[in-house]
């Protein structure tokens, strides 16, 4: 299996502890440290020592923000998935033809995943084996993506081609297929954007007239 790498994140000088801005800066550096470690050695191999070394801070600082590695991982994925949803939603022009909207959404989805492929694969592969907080994140995130799809497909353009709103079952099928396609592509050494066209065609077929 091809090792996934990403560009090393910048490492700013250690901020001086004090106010809320400093607290947020330390927390973000720890999240960035985890992201770099996942890209370099994978989540399962990463230790708290790896995170603080890459964040250039201390274990004491880490445990002031997170109870353990998994809590840090959950925070990283929560932020990454929220960012992805915002980017996809912002990319879609509700006035465009419905098939164009599908392409806009998929291209934004692919671009977001491509920006951090190691995190994308870790989210898909590692979370199911973790504890209750991670599994709760998985359920909550799935729900957020379902809501996003249903909202994007509930416009005048979509109502002109669909007899009924997008169901949860249909949204879950779409999400599951896209997630597995992206993970398998990256694990096989490809780029996420290699699957753009097939993802667009499959999504149009799944969501379009007669679906």
Image (cartoon, helix red, strand yellow):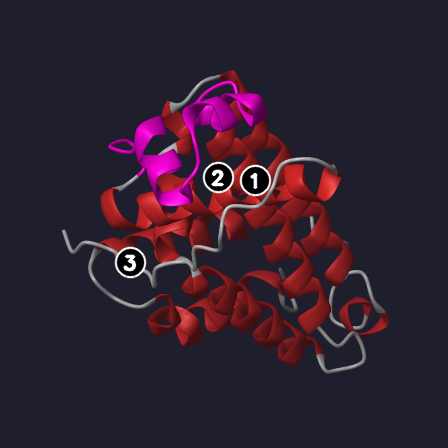
Q: Nearer the viewer, residue 21 or 185?
A: 21
Element under disc 2:
helix
Evaluate if marks 1 and 2 touch, with contact meaning CB atoms under 8 Å apart: yes
Evaluate if marks 1 and 3 touch, with contact meaning CB atoms under 8 Å apart: no
Q: Which mark is residue 30?
A: 2
Disc 3 designates what residue?
A: 186
- Between the C-alphas of marks 3 and 2, the distance is 25 Å
72 left or right of 195 in image: right
In this picture, which residue range is highlighted in magenta?
43-70
Residue 173, position as x, y percentages in the image: 52, 47
Is residue 24 positioned above or below 13 on the image? Answer: above
Disc 1 designates what residue?
A: 26
28 left or right of 179 in image: right
- Between the C-alphas of marks 1 and 2, the distance is 6 Å
Q: Earlier in the sequence, mark 1 or mark 3?
A: 1
Q: Residues within 10 Å of mark 2 (few under 14, many from 20)?
A: many
Q: Is residue 168 magenta?
A: no
Q: Earlier in the sequence, mark 3 or mark 2?
A: 2
Is residue 44 positioned above or below 5 on the image? Answer: above
Q: Residue at x 74, y 62 (%)?
A: 152
Judged by its main secondary structure, the magenta piece is helix
Is residue 20 positioned above or below 209 on the image? Answer: above
């Amino acid at each position: 299996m091809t090792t996934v790498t990403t560009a090393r994140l910048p490492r700013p000088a250690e901020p001086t502890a004090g106010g809320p801005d400093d607290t947020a800066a330390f927390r973000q550096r720890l999240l960035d440290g985890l992201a770099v470690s996942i890209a370099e050695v994978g989540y399962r191999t990463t230790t708290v020592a790896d995170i603080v070394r890459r964040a250039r801070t201390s274990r004491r600082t880490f445990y002031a923000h997170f109870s353990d590695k998994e809590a840090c991982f959950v925070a990283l994925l929560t932020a990454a998935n929220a960012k992805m949803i915002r980017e996809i939603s912002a990319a879609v022009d509700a006035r465009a033809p419905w098939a164009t909207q599908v392409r806009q959404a998929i291209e934004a989805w692919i671009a977001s995943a491509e920006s951090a492929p190691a995190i994308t694969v870790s989210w898909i592969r590692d979370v199911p084996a973790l504890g209750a907080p991670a599994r709760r994140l998985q359920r909550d995130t799935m729900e957020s993506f379902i809501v996003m799809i249903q909202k994007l497909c509930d416009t005048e353009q979509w109502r002109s081609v669909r007899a009924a709103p997008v169901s949860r079952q249909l949204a879950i099928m779409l999400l599951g297929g896209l997630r597995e396609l992206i993970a398998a592509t990256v694990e096989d050494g490809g780029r996420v954007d290699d699957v753009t066209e097939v993802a667009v065609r499959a999504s149009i077929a799944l969501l379009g007239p007669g679906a």
